Amino acid sequence: MPKCVCGAYYAQDQYLSRHEKKCSEVLKRARDAFEAAQNDALPESTTWRSHRAWRPTWKVIDMLPEEPPPPPPSPPPPPSLLPPDINHEDPRSLQPELPTITTKELKIPADSFGISRIYPAIPTPVLPVGDINPLFRLPHVALSSPLFLPRRISDIIHPYPNLSSWRFAYHHWMGSKSKSLEDRDALQDLITRPDFHASNLVGVDFRQLDKKLEETPLPWQDHHNGWKESTLTIGIPSGVKQTQAAKKAAAVAARIAATTETLPDGPVEIDVEGHHFEILGFWHRSITHIIISVFGHNTDLKDFHFHPFEKWYKRPGSDNPPERVYDELYTTQAFLDADAKIQSLPHEPCCNLPRAIAALMFASDSTNVAQFGQAKLWPGYMYIGNQSKYVHTKPQSRAAHHIAFIPLLPATIQEFGASAPLLAHCQRELFHTAWEKLLDRDFLEAYEHRLVIKCMDGIVRRIYPRIFVYSADYPEKVLIATIRNMGGCPCPRCLVAIGDLGLLSHKQDRTCRTDNVQVDSEDRQKKITTARKIIYHDGYVVNSEKVEDILKGESLVPTKNVFLPLAQFGFNLFLMLAVDLMHEFELGVWKAVFAHLVRILRAADPTLVHELNQHFQLVPIFGKSTIRRFSANCAIPCFEGLLPSPHNEQLLDLLYTLAAWHAVAKFRLHTESSLKILNKFTTWLGKALHVFQIVTCAAYETKEMEQEYTAHGRAEARQQSRQEPSATHPVAASSTTGRRRQTFNLKRYKVHALGDYVSTIRRMGSTDSYSTQISELEHRHVKVRYQHTNKNQATSQIVNMDVWEAELTRMAQELVANGVDVPGFKETVSGDTEEEIMIATHVSVTKEQRYWNTLYLGLWLAYNTSDPAFSDFLLRLQSHLRDRLADHLRPLVPAAAMTPDKLEFYFREDCIYEHSTIHFHFTTYDMQRDQDLINPSTDKCNILVSLGHPSDPSINPHPFGYACVLGIYHVQLEHRFSCDPIRFDFLWVRWYSYHDAWGGGDGTRRLDPLQFVPGHSSDAIGFLNPTHVIWGCHIIPAYDDGTTTELLGASIARDPDGDYKYYYANSRYIGHGVGHAPGSHTEAEPSLYELDETDKDEDLEALERLDDEREDEELDVDALAGEYDEDMPEGETVEEIEGQYEEY
């Protein structure tokens, strides 16, 4: 009877084979064998070309991510005291809790990547080995599935009458939201399951079941999952000044009210100044309810970090001192400082429970939800920073907690004759009134005293909510900070003047960021209180001169900030407002630069825009996506040569600096070294933007583009129609005046914000943790739900869908934990699965050997005799395979038997087998596993290999090699040393060579130039062991240099129209990759990022000439607030500019 290695017996081999594919013991042994092979010493590679020395890249260089080693043993903790005020227990029995052990810091040794951790205190719980709670995830403990108390299936799926009806409802709400082939297949799979009974759906009223889901099925859940509908009341100032008689009457009424005893059962008046205006339908959730639900009953708690720690990096084998690592929020100094504060708080009476922080990260943004129309929603989200960013940033993880739908001002507010300043004031009041509902009394109480929660891991903790981040675009940032949109001091973090927004990288700019930060002082509050009294009691309008005299100097607004009560606990409102890479750079600075470059091309020659479009259309695709917006990634080759010198060189410098800054700012893991590089790139970017503005832009008279001209025409037509209602066909002013002149404006907040990235990353971690892109992706859920409403009171229906989906997800998790299969349910399962073992390997090629992928060498070579790529094909292949066979047999066969004349081998059946794709798995710089797919029949055919010796440029000035994959094959070799054939995978490649005529990298601010090796060279085409490949590479043609047919004759190895003369490797190498092992890459010269006397500005002479020629103009603050406003020169001398470029 067939038997598995785990001891299980099976009647037939087919059942045993099916079992072995999932058997944990079989998979464990496979992994152990893989790890043993990985640790074997790799013999020196044989060089089949004398000048190309290989460095092994997978077994030595590519390292697998690993858990940190366990902390040292510590004495058992004393028993904890359980407070009597826990009122949200779940059906599971309470287990013994363990307190925080306050002792000296705990250092965890470095792993193979050189990453070590320092905990300020020993994490809890500290249990003996073997007694660790299986639900609690220590830094070195990987949990499997969550633990649920076994219950009957009927109790789990209540109120559904049977499992078939529950699965049907789960498919409807949790499956695809659109009709697609995948959705059809999923439905077919559901209804054809043997345990699905269609008869169980007869008579089931699913609409009533949806309503029952909103009830409270479990003790810890609030009604409707915590969602409530409230009415918001704001005060609208009258704008009418009171007479002396009215003031006296109001004073008398106030005195009477103060001496009159109010009735106890009378209605409670709303403490809102001005005319009360109600906004109905504000849907929101209790933040404290979400915290209790997440920490107490969410299975994702296994991924939470309750104890912050410092992460340090020291490159293995290096003498450099360790440097701090910045990635996750719970490794930042802000989290460590907040944790130290709560640990030092006085103990509550009779309580010694462990304390932890609930790190709150908010985000909100209004979005259009209708495909056609103006329907908008303003959702607010909350994320938990204790959870890894690699989880909470993914929409499919459902880690975003929807907390509110902030209402917009209704059209009925126009009954008050609201002007634009009054409408802006009312919108600010509405926003902060909504947040006042969210930051309710329960939240403020929890913020000060704690929430006592029995967490999902069985430990009772005191959880202190702390707000760390609020991600928002600029219009919403000014709402939160209660400052004016593009006012005199438009930055929510510092008091920079609007005229100084363009001084990025100047001394003055750096000084302002450090010395003139935004502070919520008593003087500031006094000004706001005084202004509100003038508006609401004295009857002045919100933009009256009397109000402006008080507030305009610091760009304040007469709105009480709802976040200010948290300041007594050390909360800084302005530090909460994080940088926004998507809106500030990708849709801000870069979009503005790109738009003006198009204007410059139109001004130089309208046909240049068409040539630019052609270049972008020819850019090859790269990555997992087949469609990519290349305008943000591949601009350098596309713009090269379109403008004459010296503007072409200045433009390429700017584009390279923009690309380099963006890449480093978007790092998912930073060290002090990478922040130093970002610091330098910020300096370079500030100078490059100034040169572009003063030199390149000044050389061309640019005007509006067609879209801008049309948009201005429509705006002017609307303005004229409002001024002249009787006009039936208003004519836009721009239609008669023509296109207006358009200049490049550096005085934008988004340019100024680029200088805050280094300090923000040091304080909050890498930008991918709090980018607004996360909330923009979450908008998809809201938009999909909106499409499933009847568009009448859609918000309430969206809220209902949120409740239903949350309940169905909870049920699915519990069903899976109890062994019930749930079609369509995806859960991260830790363990040695077959997929994980495959990802752990470096190369993945199919084992297919069928007639359709078989190439008989004799016929195939005879058919391609005239192709120059097939010259000496068989001899080269035999030489390549002989070297690899010798390496394979070296441990088994004496060296004397492996001479070329004795090491004979044969191609089994005289054929090789072709494959369409090959996968390369590798470890990224942030210690994650990633995958590249190479397909020779598409543009995804270029690879990067490791060559030479990176520390010795004399051996190879460039440490990487590039190749174009022509084919993917494997062969079965037969030889006399074994009866069984040996399989060898190999790549047929065409080599690129590094073009030394002009260099690449940060020193020259150019991409690395490449060209194909000429076809007459023996190194032009060859074979490659796939294990030498690091990953795929994006190679872009240098369009400006044109094509040639001289490198290789007509062949399947090149395009029919010829090769481009030169190419660019769309990568920049600066080193410092933590996930890349020593020797796997080159480090940039450290002095390159140091500020020295030569690093002033290579274009200062041009700046000096232009500065002398241009006249100083008076700064117009109002003009600077627009998107397309005129640029004003700085009015500085070159001597003043000389010393202004410094690092932050």
Image (cartoon, rainbow, N blue to C red):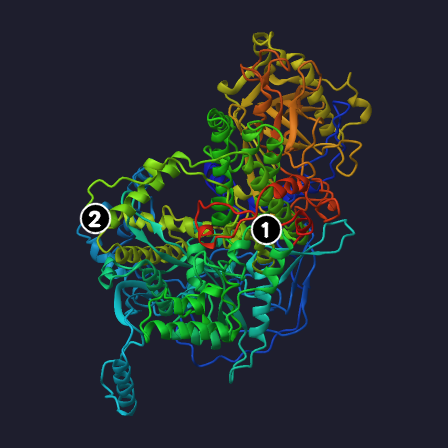
Instruction: Name the element at disc 1.
Output: loop
Q: Which mark is residue 3?
A: none
- Work out whether residue 821 or residue 1063 is closer to the camera in this orientation and state it: 1063
Mark found first going from the N terminus, 2 or 1: 1
Residue 884 image point, x, y percent: 70, 26
What SS does tag 2 mark? loop
Which residue type carries mark 1?
Answer: Leu
The numbered disc on residue 504 is 1
Residue 540 picture location, percent across and down: 33, 70
On the question of residue 263 being in view, the answer is yes
Q: Using the image as rendered, state which of residue 947 and residue 581 is in the foreground.
A: 581
- Amino acid bearing label 2: Pro
**Is the residue 909 above or below the residue 1030 in the image?**
above
Can the viewer see residue 29 in this picture? Answer: no
User: Which residue sits at x=45%, y=75%?
Assistant: 526
446 lies left or right of 1003: left
Looking at the picture, how far across and down is residue 695, in whole percent? 59, 38
- Circle 2: is it few (<14), some (14-19), or many (20+) Cα within 10 Å? few
Q: Mark 2–mark 1 contact, CB under 8 Å?
A: no
Eyeballing the image, is 755 above or below 531?
above
Which residue lies under the disc numbered 2?
A: 725
Q: Residue 314 in the image: x percent, y percent?
A: 72, 53
Query: The C terminus is located in which quarter?
Result: bottom right
Q: Residue at x 39, y 39 (%)?
A: 708
Task: Say whether residue 760 is left or right of residue 292.
Answer: right
Asked where in the image residue 34 lies, by quadrant, the reply is top right
The single residue placed furthest to the right in the displayed view is 896
Q: Nearer the viewer, residue 400 or 979?
A: 400
Vertical order, 962 against 469 (above or below): above
